[in-house]
Image (tube, helix red, strand yellow):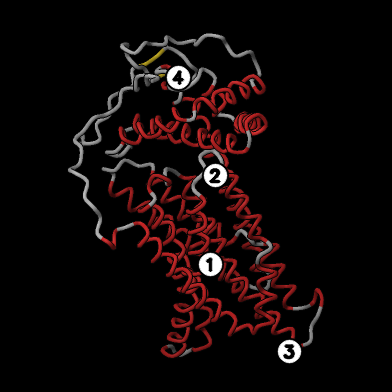
Amino acid sequence: MTAFPPYPTHPTGPVDGALRHPRWWQRRWVRYGALIALLALSGLVILALVREQTGTEGFLVGICLAVLPVPVLIAAFRWLDRVEPGPWRNMIFAFAWGACAAALIAIVANSFATKWIAATTADPSSADTLGATVIAPIVEESAKAAAVLLVFLFRRRDFTGIVDGVVIAGVTATGFAFTENILYLGTAFGTDQITGDRGIASVTAATFFVRVIMSPFAHPLFTVLTGIGFGIAAFSAERQHARRVLVPLGGLLLAMSMHALWNGSSAFGEYGFFAVYGTFMVPAFGLLTWLAIWTRQRELRTVREELPAYVVAGWLGLTEPFVLSSMRARQLAREYAGHHLGKAAAREVARYETYATSLAFLRRRGLRGRAGADFALRERELLAELWKRRHVARPAMEYAARASAPVRVPAQAPWPVYGAHGPAYGVQAGYGRPQPYPAYNPYRS
């Protein structure tokens, strides 16, 4: 039996009591079943409501047009998440929540609030304006933020930083925008059927241009602000209670404010919409896109800086920190495994890359005192997953290093490698002189 390499030093702490058998309502299949039933029921209700407002023909036209930007947006968020890909089930849940549950909450709450304002104010004509600029941003952003909150609370291991918040929030908003676009495009088509307008002068063409061509990123842009708030909270220490609460709330308030400004742009005059779009929306979109890409690159740098500690301890191969910190080298490793050993091996290499990335992020949080009480357990789990796949992954990693390295990879490690009875050390960026891995105590106040 092959002996495991020594672990890098890691925290030790009290272990929870004996495992208890969960009650029936705590079982996973019960929770999943209830969630699926809730989303399915919400989907059926929202589709029925939209079809009632648009008619069958308008409903079908709306679906065909509204679905066009969805693959592009999903692909963009999935690309952003490639460094440490989250499970597909989280993205499916986020999209379903946005398209079904959040959309249902919004259409019911917005309709009720608008009717209530019209009935209680002296100027009923202002109800639509107040509903669009005040009620809708609060209701819609809160409904979409609920999906981010649920993943943050119940899928905590999959939610470790800003990129995860951006992806979950963006996919949720994409689902919401899909359902909303069905309603708007279907209603526009019904209007054209009544007036007889056709072609580029039709209401359908104008609605499609504004909502699908010019601003498919609008809802994702708003909700991503909430996701960034939750991402910052996820990277904060558990003892920073105020920060973990106030930062997500601040992100939600910013999302509501941006949404309100966008909805109220038509009240700024004939060219108010284009003024807000050009001076505010496009720059904000560019800034958040830059932030997301910069954060993605920072994640790769974290992988490069933290994994050498596990090379020293013998868990990883010499070239693996280099390969795992390059998206091109990662792809080469997967292609090599797939070409020589088949698709199953390529999937195993992909899992190996994901586990190694999670390990680097976990170590970074531990070094900064931001890891949870399960740090040691999680580290052992990730190392065990890597060790199971080493025979498939290491040849692919070595090939990728040779194929993508700008210079020859050294034959020996530029740091001391300790035996089973020697100390395990971490290594700072640049593979310099080894430094002790600081002990981390999650119970320290």
Helix, strand or loop at label 3? It is helix
Do the residues under discs 1 and 4 have CB atoms within 8 angstroms? no
The residue singled out by tag 4 in the image is 311
Residue kind at label 2, given as amino acid type: Asp
Do the residues under discs 1 and 3 have CB atoms within 8 angstroms? no
The residue singled out by tag 2 in the image is 81
Q: Which of marks 1 and 3 is in front?
A: 1
> Dot 4: few (<14), some (14–19), or many (≥20) neighbours within 10 Å?
many
Residue kind at label 4, given as amino acid type: Val
Of the pair 371 and 259, the residue shown nearer to us: 371
Residue 99, labelled with which disc? 1
Q: Which circle's residue, 1 or 4, is located before the other in the chain?
A: 1
Helix, strand or loop at label 4? It is helix
> The N terminus appears in which quarter of the rendering?
top left
In the image, residue 259 lies at what x, y percent?
52, 65
Q: Which circle's residue, 2 or 3, is located before the other in the chain?
A: 2
Dividing the picture into quadrants, the one containing residue 358 is: top left
Query: Could you tell me how far apart the alpha carbons at marks 2 and 3 are, in whole angstroms?
Result: 45 Å
The residue singled out by tag 3 in the image is 194
Q: Which of marks 1 and 4 is in front?
A: 4
Query: Could you tell me how far apart the alpha carbons at marks 2 and 1 are, in whole angstroms?
Result: 21 Å
Residue kind at label 1, given as amino acid type: Ala
Residue kind at label 3, given as amino acid type: Ile
Q: Nearer the viewer, mark 2 or mark 3?
A: 2
